[in-house]
Image (cartoon, rainbow, N blue to C red):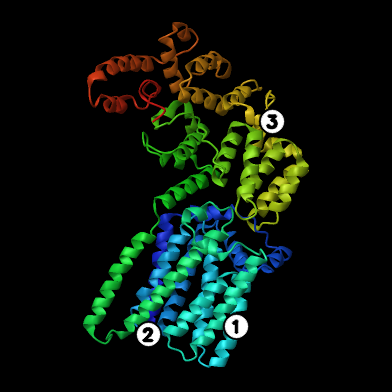
Amino acid sequence: MTGRTLVFWLFVFIGLWFFFWSFGTSTFQRQEEVQLFIPEWVIIRDMLSVPGGFCTVVGQALVQYYTASLFVLCVNSIFLCVAGFLCYLLLQEIAPRGYNLLLALFPVLGLLKAHTSSFYVLDGTVGLILLLLFSYVFIRIRRMKVQLFYGVVSVFLVYGLTGQLAALYGLVVVCMSLLCRRRKWSGSLAVFLAGVLLAYIGIRLAIGIPLTDGIYSERYQESQLQPDSYVYFIWIRFVVLLLILFTTAFAMKALPWGKRSVKVLVTGGLLVVLFCFSAFCLPGPYEVRNNRMNELSVWEQRNDWDTIIREHPEKEVTDYVCLNYLNMALAQKGALGDRLFHYDQKGPQSLLASWDRTYYMSCLLSDIHYMIGDISLSEGYAMEGLTLAKRGGSPRLLQRLVKISLIRRDFALADKYLGILGRLPGYRRWAEKYTGYVRHPERIGQDGELATKTIPAFQPDNLLCLTGIDSLWVGHLSEPGVNRVAWEYLGCSYLLAKEMEKFKIFLSHASRFLPGQSLPVHFQEAALVLATEDLSVLDWVSIRPEIVQRYKQFQKDILKIKNSSDGLSWLYRQYGDTFWFYYYCKNLNG
């Protein structure tokens, strides 16, 4: 390898590093929490006994350390560089040309797009690197008998290490033998046929899903409960791209590469095509949105509420998931009732979105209900998320179940969950801390989080799944002490649903929960709306004079803009941060 080649791949590594750094590592960190990899020999041995188990072990062993951002950047950048470099070596075997460095970037960009998807796993890239490595060794062997022997042995080895990728390995070997114009290239057909036969036997024995599932659309792959299908989707397209590059390199052999004009034209043309291809390989709106949601989840786990609020400019239109995280952050900062309508709320689901039977929403809803104090609902969603995690479980949700078990004083169940977490290197210290609560229950009262959580004293008449959310939150008001978060969520849910009669009843009990304190700003604004129908509301609700004056001005302004074409937008600029604008001017149906 020349110094120029080394410098080129060093620059590629730096470029990949900065790309992943700018894109963010939250998507990769999310992969860590949807796998339950226990690095013990008995478990690893069972995984290795299955074709493709080696890739699974290597992938999960690395992903378990994805909580460290620096490690994420290193692993992904190195793996893509290694894959690109091996592609470059294969292209050099067809025709040693300088433009092969540019051709080798096409697979790198293709894998770059795959790595930014939350549905792809590192196992896939491990398998592709093995495919490229074994292919390069095969094509470097010159003696026919040795090459044939190596090919047959290697295809069995590739099958054991990567699984059904062996069929695609055989295809690459045949293509390389043809394009390198090797005599007796037909011997490589034995490698291809052996790979296809092994893949077929594996499918018939139900060892895994068929490789052919990878030909279906990307949306189909994303809907599968296991990541294997999406990995096959990437494998097939990577090999197709590889064969196209091999054919292109073979066709370009005829060009008089010694002429300077030819070098300039070829290099310029490849750079243009590479630029166009890179535009396709950049993360699309779907990947960007998923990454944004993963960022919110990571900040929420770190209790970084200020960052969540700062990342949502006021009056910015956003979706339900972002609003759920934003309102959760406002509640944790004690500002939900004061700043709720500073943002573009979209009805009651802005507080609590519908469950869509995904791992992501299960985690979010479990966290919201846990924060409010709905312990049973939080546990239910945590259980759902645990079953929806694509790689055997979720350490994050096991942590949630440990805390809920300790709140319930079910120490046997908590100890069971802690036993699993204690076997994970990244969670061992956390498990040791909470195991101390199992051994010494009196320490729970000293924990800042667990001490404030209690099992609700009220018992719903119906099954929990048939109990309305507002009924569940009303139940918290009968508990001893003041659950400020549940109280604010209940009041805000009435305002977002525009259920003013329920809010009026809710408001009549406010003095019991906030003795000597003023109501949140939006609750005072809603009280003025109620007072237009029933002035007695003002007898038991104290409202700040400046809010009263602003409401009077709002009533005047809303009459002025009735015949104005841009009156509503002007009113939004003036009063968009109030409940009044939401109540009188916003259509919940869109």
Q: Position of residue 457 (x, y in %)?
A: 70, 25
Residue visible at 31% across and 27% down in the picture: 572
Question: Closer to the camera: disc 3 or disc 2?
Answer: 2
Name the foreground residue: 459 vs 525: 459
Left/right of residue 494 with respect to residue 59 in the rendered view: left
The residues tagged by marks 1 and 2 sit, at their Cα atoms, a distance apart of 27 Å
Q: Which residue is mark 1?
A: 152
Query: Of marks 3 and 2, which one's residue comes earlier in the chain?
Result: 2
Q: Considering only vertical position in the picture, is 229 above or below 337?
A: below
Residue visible at 73% across and 44% down in the picture: 414
Q: Which residue is mark 2?
A: 96
Query: Of marks 3 and 1, which one's residue comes earlier in the chain?
Result: 1
Q: Considering only vertical position in the picture, is 30 above or below 540?
A: below
Question: Closer to the camera: disc 3 or disc 1?
Answer: 1
Disc 1 crowd rating (10 Å Cα; few below 14, some 14-19, many 20+) is some
Local secondary structure at mark 3: loop
Local secondary structure at mark 1: helix
Question: Closer to the camera: disc 1 or disc 2?
Answer: 1
Query: Of marks 1 and 2, which one's residue comes earlier in the chain?
Result: 2
Q: Considering only vertical position in the picture, is 34 above or below 372?
A: below
Is residue 448 among what the camera can see? no
- At label 3, which amino acid type do we have? Ile
Disc 3 crowd rating (10 Å Cα; few below 14, some 14-19, many 20+) is some
The residues tagged by marks 3 and 2 sit, at their Cα atoms, a distance apart of 71 Å
Residue contact between numbered discs 3 and 2, judged by CB atoms under 8 Å: no
The residues tagged by marks 3 and 1 sit, at their Cα atoms, a distance apart of 63 Å
Which quarter of the picture shows residue 556?
Answer: top left
Question: Which quarter of the figure is the C terminus placed in?
Answer: top left
Q: Position of residue 422 (x, y in %)?
A: 70, 54
Residue visible at 53% across and 54% down in the picture: 29
Q: Which residue is mark 3?
A: 455
